[in-house]
């Protein structure tokens, strides 16, 4: 008798899960973004504006945040600069004549992407 009760209970739970998924409209599994996008840089005298151009075919994995890191040619460690919920980030208060390179990482509720390509060379302000 205990086995029958257990089967009934499991089938009821399984049915509840499928019903919930159907009502919620879950059609697939959300995946982490493939990448933060191709970084495009625009300099001013005291800042760098980074725009992440979406990767081709990346519409299935929405990006909720992008994290920006930088480093100088004299330091191998990457420093967290900030995060944005848009495709643009502006690094401000940069010393004139400073050299830096930048990269980004995208995230959504499923996880983090691989890091973006690093700027092709150190950018001088």
Image (cartoon, rainbow, N blue to C red):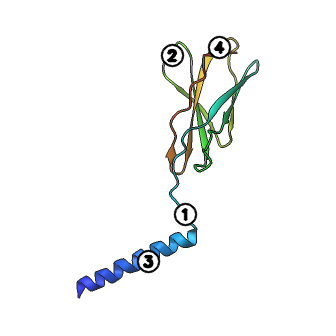
At 52% from the left and 40% from the top, the residue drawn is 113
Give the spatial CA distance, label 4 vs label 2.
13 Å
At 40% from the left and 80% from the top, the residue drawn is 12
Residue 9 drawn at (x, y percent) = 35, 81
Which residue in the protein does label 3 denote?
15
Res 75 label = 2
At 54% from the left and 51% from the top, the residue drawn is 109
Give the spatial CA distance, label 1 vs label 3.
17 Å
Give the answer, above or below, for where 31 lies relative to 75.
below
Which residue in the protein does label 1 denote?
27
Quarter the N terminus occupies: bottom left
Would you call the spot at circle 3 few (<14 residues within 10 Å), some (14-19), or many (20 or more)?
few
Would you call the spot at circle 1 few (<14 residues within 10 Å), some (14-19), or many (20 or more)?
few
Give the answer, above or below, for where 41 lies relative to 57.
above
Would you call the spot at circle 2 few (<14 residues within 10 Å), some (14-19), or many (20 or more)?
few
Q: Earlier in the sequence, mark 1 or mark 3?
A: 3
């Amino acid at each position: 008798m205990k086995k029958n009760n257990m089967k009934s209970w499991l089938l009821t739970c399984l049915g509840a899960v499928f019903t919930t998924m159907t009502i919620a409209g879950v059609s697939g599994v959300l995946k982490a973004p493939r990448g933060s996008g191709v970084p495009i840089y625009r300099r001013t005298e005291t800042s760098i504006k980074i725009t992440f151009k979406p990767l081709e075919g990346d519409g299935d994995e929405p990006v909720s945040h992008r994290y920006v890191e930088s480093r100088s040619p004299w330091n191998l460690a990457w420093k967290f600069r900030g995060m944005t919920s848009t495709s643009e980030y502006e690094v401000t208060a940069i010393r004139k004549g400073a050299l830096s390179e930048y990269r980004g990482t995208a995230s959504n509720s499923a996880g983090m992407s691989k890091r973006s390509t690093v700027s092709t060379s150190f950018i001088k302000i």
